Image (spheres, rainbow, N blue to C red):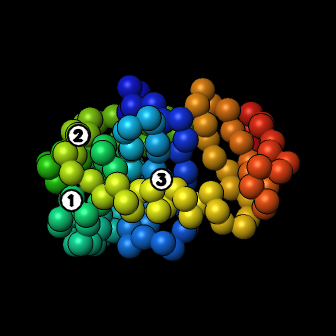
């Protein structure tokens, strides 16, 4: 994912506005990057049965990755165009397979999710460009704090 820099990345958005609830989604200009974390093979196999996996154009993310510990998902398990990231000891992440570019995505769901996350009435932690982190206060725009270790 080194070349797919996102200006805004939201982890576990929990905005029940779309059918798809990604573990993380990043927005970088025109491109979006979706990341699905899997802790077991059963979790991965269940994920493959979701409607937006069966019909990729219903899903979010111009680029899509699964992230897991080595061996949970293998290169050969991946559906077409999906990338694979392994979390190594110490928390380092290695790209095993880059994501291809999904030609058709659910841009309306992405915009709805982003809008809902910005509107929600609780503090959000958003990672921004160049590693700066911003915590938004309950009233959007008031009391914005930039920190390094949020």
For the N terminus, give its image quadrant. Answer: top left
Residue 2 in the image: x percent, y percent? Answer: 41, 27
For the C terminus, give its image quadrant. Answer: top right
Comparing 108 with 61, the one in front is 108
Q: Residue at position x 40%, y 50% from top?
A: 35
Quarter of the view holding residue 5: top left
**Disc nearer the start of the sequence (1/2):** 1
Q: Is residue 137 above or below residue 32?
A: below
Q: Is residue 18 above or below residue 72?
A: below
Q: Residue at position x 80%, y 45% from top?
A: 144
Q: Which residue is mark 1?
A: 56
Direction right: furthest residue: 143
Classify mark 1: helix, strand or loop.
helix
Alpha-carbon neighbours of circle 2 within 10 Å: few (<14), some, or many (≥20)?
Answer: some
Nearest to viewer (mark 1 / mark 3): 1
Nearest to viewer (mark 3 / mark 2): 2
Q: Residue at position x 27%, y 53% from top?
A: 105
Classify mark 3: helix, strand or loop.
strand
Image position of 80 (left or right of 137):
left
Q: Which disc number belongs to residue 101? A: 2
Q: Residue at position x 62%, y 57% from top?
A: 118
Alpha-carbon neighbours of circle 1 within 10 Å: few (<14), some, or many (≥20)?
Answer: some
Alpha-carbon neighbours of circle 3 within 10 Å: few (<14), some, or many (≥20)?
Answer: some
Q: CA distance from mark 3 to mark 2?
A: 17 Å
Q: CA distance from mark 1 to mark 3?
A: 17 Å
Quarter of the view holding residue 39: bottom left
**Disc nearer the start of the sequence (1/3):** 3
**Disc nearer the start of the sequence (3/2):** 3
Q: CA distance from mark 1 to mark 2?
A: 11 Å
Comparing 1 with 88, the one in front is 1
Residue 17 in the image: x percent, y percent? Answer: 48, 72
Q: Which residue is mark 3?
A: 24
């Amino acid at each position: 994912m080194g070349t797919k820099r996102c200006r805004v990345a939201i982890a576990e958005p929990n905005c029940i506005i779309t059918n798809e609830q990604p573990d993380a989604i990043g927005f970088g200009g025109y491109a979006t990057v979706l990341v699905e974390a899997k802790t077991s093979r059963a979790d991965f196999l269940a994920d493959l049965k979701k409607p937006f996996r069966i019909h990729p154009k219903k899903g979010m993310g111009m680029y899509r990755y699964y992230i897991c510990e080595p061996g949970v998902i293998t290169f050969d398990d991946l559906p077409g165009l999906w990338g694979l990231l392994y979390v190594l000891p110490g928390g380092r992440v290695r790209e095993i397979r880059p994501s291809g570019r999904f030609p058709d995505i659910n841009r309306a769901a992405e915009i709805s999710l982003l809008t809902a996350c910005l509107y929600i009435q609780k503090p959000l932690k958003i990672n921004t460009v160049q590693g700066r982190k911003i915590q938004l206060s309950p009233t959007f725009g008031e009391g914005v704090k930039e920190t390094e270790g949020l």
